[in-house]
Image (cartoon, rainbow, N blue to C red):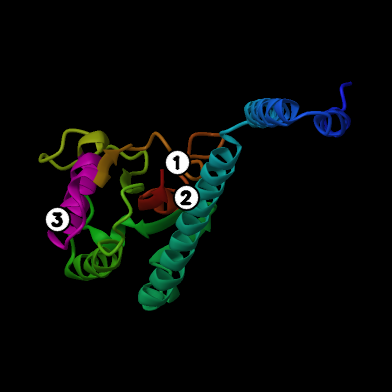
């Protein structure tokens, strides 16, 4: 490798022999200095190109995503605690059960607490509880927060002339609950109503001989409100 410092020393010693050599030396030193600067800049740019330029962005985006998940989880946990306190009297009466599972809060209410048998018209007590629920969930402004309202029946056929089947009855009931939630301030595009009739029982409606199990039928006649982050 050429030692630039040694070359410059030699040129300085030779420059003492004549004035024209001194001027020539100045020019050479300037050219060499310029060359050294160019080489240095080139190596610096090559180093920059070798380093991934999006490393910091990737770390930042990953961190932001983790922060968003953490915020949503805290929001769901807070919702669970506040609803547990808000509905404490109904929970103690065993007409309502509340559970927290990962990023979902689920409220399960007995149909008898909300509706008369074979009807989709809400009892006043059921309306009051739904209004309490609506007043809290309406405060959640996160666009990833959704509510599913699900109606379930047992396997007994509908005898009322107003509804042709358990599918009609369960769907009408869930739609009425949605109406209450919307009237109390919840966002329409983040809620949906579904009726499942007796297609999703919690426990068997009948025993192995086909005889009805009344206690199980009562458990299967239920209403579920699922609140979650999507």
- Residue 41 marker: none
Q: Could you tell me what secondary structure mostly forms the magenta stretch? A: helix
Tell which circle, 3 or 2, labels the residue nearer the N-terminal end.
3
Q: Which residue is mark 1?
A: 201
Q: Which residue is mark 3?
A: 121
Front position among marks 3 and 2: 3
Q: Which residue is mark 2?
A: 216
Give the magenta-colored segment's residue range.
169-189
Residue at screen point 87% across, 33% down? 13
Q: Where the N terminus falls, by quadrant?
A: top right
Tell which circle, 3 or 1, labels the residue nearer the N-terminal end.
3
Q: Badge 1, how many Cα within 10 Å: few under 14, some, many 20+?
A: some
Which one is nearer the viewer's eye here, 108 or 84?
Answer: 84
Residue 182 drawn in magenta? yes
Residue at screen point 19% across, 65% down? 127
Front position among marks 2 and 1: 1
Real-space CA distance between mark 3 and mark 2, rounded to the nearest whole angstrom: 24 Å
Identify the element where label 2 is drawn: helix
- Can residue 87 be seen in this snapshot? yes
Q: Are marks 3 and 1 in contact (CB under 8 Å)?
A: no
Which one is nearer the viewer's eye here, 182 or 117?
Answer: 182
């Amino acid at each position: 490798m050429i030692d630039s410092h040694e070359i410059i020393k030699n040129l300085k010693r030779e420059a003492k022999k004549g004035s024209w050599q001194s001027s020539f030396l100045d020019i050479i030193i300037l050219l060499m200095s310029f060359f050294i600067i160019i080489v240095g800049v080139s190596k610096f740019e090559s180093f920059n190109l070798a380093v991934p330029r999006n490393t910091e962005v990737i770390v930042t985006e990953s961190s932001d995503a983790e922060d968003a998940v953490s915020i949503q989880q805290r929001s769901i946990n807070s919702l669970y605690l506040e609803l547990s306190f808000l509905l404490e009297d109904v929970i103690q009466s065993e007409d309502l059960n509340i559970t927290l599972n990962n990023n979902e809060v689920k409220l399960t209410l007995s149909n008898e607490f909300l509706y008369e048998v074979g009807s989709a018209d809400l009892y006043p007590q059921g309306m009051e509880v739904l209004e309490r629920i609506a007043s809290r969930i309406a405060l959640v402004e996160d666009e990833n927060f959704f509510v599913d309202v699900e109606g379930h029946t047992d396997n007994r056929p509908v005898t009322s002339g107003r509804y042709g089947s358990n599918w009609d009855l369960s769907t009408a009931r869930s739609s009425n609950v949605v109406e209450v939630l919307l009237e109390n301030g919840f966002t329409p595009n983040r809620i949906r109503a579904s009726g499942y009739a007796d297609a999703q029982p919690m426990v068997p409606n009948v025993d192995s001989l086909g005889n009805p199990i009344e206690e199980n039928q009562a458990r299967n006649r239920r209403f579920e409100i699922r609140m979650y982050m999507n």
